[in-house]
Each structure stands twice: as structure tokens, then as C-alpha cells.
Amino acid sequence: MPRKRVLLTGFDPFGGQAVNPSWMAVAALHGTTVAGHEVIGAQVPTVFGAALQAMRDLLRQHKPTLVLATGQAGGRAAISLERVAINVNDARIPDNSGAQPVDTPVVPGGPAAYFTRLPIKAMLTELQLRGIHAEVSQTAGTFVCNHLFYGLMHELETDPALRDVRAGLIHVPWLPEQGQPSMPLAELVEGLKACIECALATGHDIVRQAGALN
Ligand code: PCA
């Protein structure tokens, strides 16, 4: 039996920052085993299009049962469990290739939005029990993180081989050396590990239940 895998992605630094805490936390978990699953950590570029192509390749290469895409959200004080991905690219700053799409679709003709497949309310409770600042977020923005999130969910919806894969996006705060508000790297790593454990242990995806959205 091949080992079951969890795919974790983080982004490279962007917007003039020297580091990206999402990648640092993912790198710390790469190669570890969590709840019997091998954790594959991969860096994706903060580039429209290329980030999504990297994700498509990673999905086919590793065949994960769970995917947590992570990204930095400067200005947020908590681990943000993103509820929804929208079909819009609207960049406030250029990406790492210099591209700055404004009001373009991630997937032309795709639905307006996809909900996460992660059990975000269960994950929120788990993080709070451990004393880690966490929140459910209603917007992943319109930059490369939302782009990757929407494209990932679209891939899962449209490829029958990926029908049962659980996936979503989590935003993380800056590290203390980047500014405030921030979260220490050790707390980020513990938080992402707790998210993996919770997603693997929670059978019921509460977000997809009509009437159970709050
Ligand atoms: N955060 C950006 C893109 C890369 C990252 O780490 C975002 O929130 O869109």
C-alpha cells in the first residue's frame, strides 16, 4: 500500500518582503508524518498562472488525500481559515513576474465561487483549544492566494480522479521580524499541524451542509 499523503504548499516571498512565513512553516513540516500521513511540502511561485500550474503538477505527482494551500496575509493577527474562493484576479501590486491582472477571471466561464472543502469550524475550535489565534475568514482577497485557491477547487470539481480530495486555503500572519501583527514561526507550525490532524480526523465537512454555514 502506498502511504497516504498530505500536500502542503507555501508561497515564495513577494511584495518586497525577505521571507514568506507560509513557506517557512510548510518547509518545517515537509517530510514529517502526521496522523499516519506523509507530509509533502512544496513552494509555489507568487505568480498568476504559474502557481496554479505548479499545483496541478503536484496533485498529479503526489495524489494527496488532503491539500492545505497556505499563504501570507500581512495585517492579519490570526491563522485565517478561508471559507470561499472567488473567480477573480484583481492585483493591487504586481506578482513576482511583474504581471498585475485587473478584473480577469481565474477560470473563464467558471462558477463565481467555490467553498473550501476543509472543516473550517472544527479546525477553528481545535486551534482555539490549543490557544492559537485563529479565525474563519470570508475573503482570501483577489491576489495570487485566491487565484491558487479557486484554481485548486476548480481542479477538484472538474477532474473525477480528484473528487474525494479535501482541500482549501489558510492564510497566516507575518513573522515578528516582518512587523505587526505577527505570530511566531513555532506557533504557525503547530497551528498547521493541528489543522492537518483535525481535517484528517473530521469526517463531516460542515461547510458543505446547507443550513449549517454559521
Ligand atoms: N500571499 C499572497 C500571495 C502569496 C502569499 O503568500 C496572497 O494573499 O494573495
Image (cartoon, grey):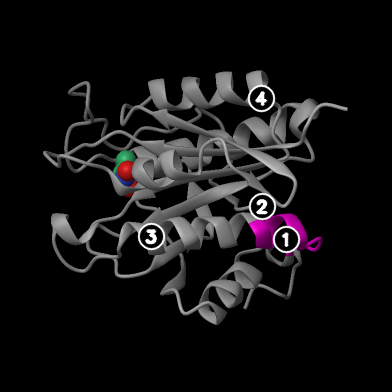
Q: CA distance from mark 4 to mark 3?
A: 26 Å
Residue 101 appears in the figure: yes
Ligand 1, image quadrant it occupies: top left
Q: Which numbered mark, 4 or 1, is in the foreground of this view?
A: 4
The percent position of residue 54, horizontal first and vertical second, equals: 48, 22
Q: Which numbered mark, 4 or 3, is in the foreground of this view?
A: 3
Amino acid of disc 1: Arg
Mark positioned earlier in the residue sequence (4 or 2):
4
Range of residues picked out in magenta: 197-205
Question: Is-magenta flag for residue 2?
Answer: no
Mark positioned earlier in the residue sequence (4 or 1):
4
With respect to residue 113, does 96 lie above or below?
Answer: above
For the residues bearing labels 1 and 3, Cβ distance under 8 angstroms: no
Mark positioned earlier in the residue sequence (1 or 2):
2
Counting other residues with Cα less than 10 Å from the Cα at mark 1, is it few (<14), some (14-19), or many (20 or more)?
some
Asked if ligand 1 lies within 8 A of label 1, the reply is: no
Q: CA distance from mark 2 to mark 3?
A: 26 Å
Amino acid of disc 2: Arg
Counting other residues with Cα less than 10 Å from the Cα at mark 2, is it few (<14), some (14-19), or many (20 or more)?
many
Residue marked by disc 2:
117
Residue marked by disc 4:
62
The percent position of residue 82, horizontal first and vertical second, equals: 49, 58
